[in-house]
Image (tube, helix red, strand yellow):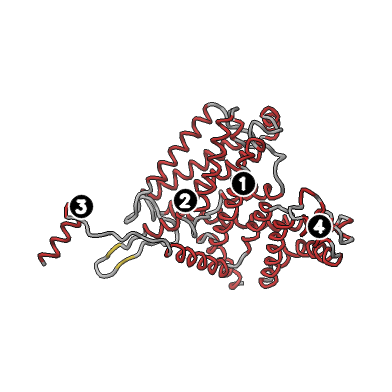
Amino acid sequence: MIRSDRSLARALARVTDTALGPYQTAVIRIGFAVTWLLFLLREYPHRQDLYGPDGPWSWDMAQQLIAANHAFTALLWFDGRIWFEIGYVLSVVVSALLVLGWRTRTMSVLFMVCVLSLQNRSVFVGDGGDNVIHLMAIYLVFTRCGQVWSLDARRAARSRVTITGPTSPIEPTSTSSPAVPGSPGRREDRAGVVLWWVLALVLAAVTLVGRLDGGVLGGWLTLFWGLLAVHAVWWALGRRAPYGQPRIMLDVIANVVHNAALLVIMAEACLIYATAGWYKIQGTRWQDGTAVYYPLHLDSFSPWPALSDLLSSSGVLVLLVTYGTVLVQVAFPFTLFNRRVKNVLLAVMMTEHAAIAVVLGLPFFSLAMIAADAVFLPTSFLKRLGGWAARARGALLSRVPRRVPGPRRAEEHTPEEAEQSHVGFTA
């Protein structure tokens, strides 16, 4: 009984004290942001036909649907080409900034706004990958996805300075949490404050003109104002009492919300595979082992006709791929209890999605599913992956010639440098 109580206490302490899966949340942040960014860039010449005024799904039709289902889209706030172009370009910029991890808390909210705005503008555009991005964009808002592999993490590491004591240096009490604005030895995050005020003014203007639908219990209006208020309280407590009880309580709440969102992301990925597998079992073409043959001969899914003909020419190969797909999708949620089997099936599923991207011409669907699968990757593998990326980046930068600064004239030195130089000379 005592052991069980201690185990429960340790598990509770871990959930409240730590934001679990920092590398997993970072890789899904990067994965989904890269997928959406590449999609926007590829469809840039066709943006007007997909989501803009030139599309078959007109502005009036979209407005009627949104009025019925209360979905969110900022593209219907104003009718016109200029407003659409602003929204599309903003989506590209926000996706790029989320990949880099610049102000991830704010960018994750804007990323959700941009994804929902475009997808809900034309609900009949896209495939299953768009649905995955749609859901994950909402879940990412509640995660602390910028703990590693982000500009936020690098800025936090640089701002943690050592406070020199009488005999030995003393580190700040919390080195795992991001830098707190206004805390001792840390620089003020002025860019974050300016960004908050700009978004607050925009939200206030949108609210005053009545563009946000209140819906049930306030709906999107309550969500956005609530997120804005939480950011304001977080900044205020970090500035006035960075190590006080209220600030610690906010950290605990943030960790719990992050861990809950991470669990929801994992459950969502399992649900996607489980439902897809069990629905396939009910189909006669999947039962007789010929289901994979038919999409290989559809013009819309045959970017390489010769490759499709080669793969479909072998009945044994079609049978194995058909049954193997169903088996992997149904079995994957149950393999989470065995790490080795889970990693093997994870590699098989990622390979399958990569093959779908090439053979069936669905790169963004495959990228979205690979990004969803990445939440189950082992931390040790992700750390090695980060090390490889860092070494590749270092090797690439080492080839770039750098200009070596020459000696400066006396009048070019700052007063501090001149004073140090003078002291060193006289000593």
Marks 3/2: CA–CA distance: 34 Å
Residue 34 placement (x, y as % from top left): 58, 52
Residue at 83%, 63% (x, y): give it.
318
Question: N-terminal of the two: label 1 or label 3?
Answer: 1
Q: Does the residue at mark 4 contact the one at mark 1 (Cβ under 8 Å)?
A: no
33 w.r.t. 160: above or below? above
Residue at 67%, 50% (x, y): give it.
132
From the image, state whether disc 3 or disc 4 is nearer to you: 3
Q: Give the position of the C terminus as an image quadrant.
A: bottom left
Marks 3/4: CA–CA distance: 73 Å
Residue situated in front as seen by the camera: 16 or 347 = 347
Residue situated in front as seen by the camera: 87 or 326 = 87
Q: Does the residue at mark 3 contact the one at mark 2 (Cβ under 8 Å)?
A: no
267 w.r.t. 8: above or below? above
Q: Which residue is mark 2?
A: 102
Residue situated in front as seen by the camera: 104 or 92 = 92
Marks 2/4: CA–CA distance: 40 Å
Q: Which mark is residue 278?
A: 4
Q: Does the residue at mark 3 contact the one at mark 4 (Cβ under 8 Å)?
A: no
Kind of residue at disc 2 = Trp
- Residue at the extreme front of the image, as rendered: 306
Q: Which residue is mark 1?
A: 42
Marks 1/3: CA–CA distance: 48 Å
Question: N-terminal of the two: label 2 or label 4?
Answer: 2
Kind of residue at disc 3 = Glu
Q: Which mark is residue 412?
A: 3
Residue situated in front as seen by the camera: 36 or 11 = 36
Kind of residue at disc 4 = Trp
- Badge 1: few (under 14), some or many (20 or more) residues near its Cα, within 10 Å? few
Q: Which mark is residue 222?
A: none
The secondary structure type at the circle numbered 2 is: loop
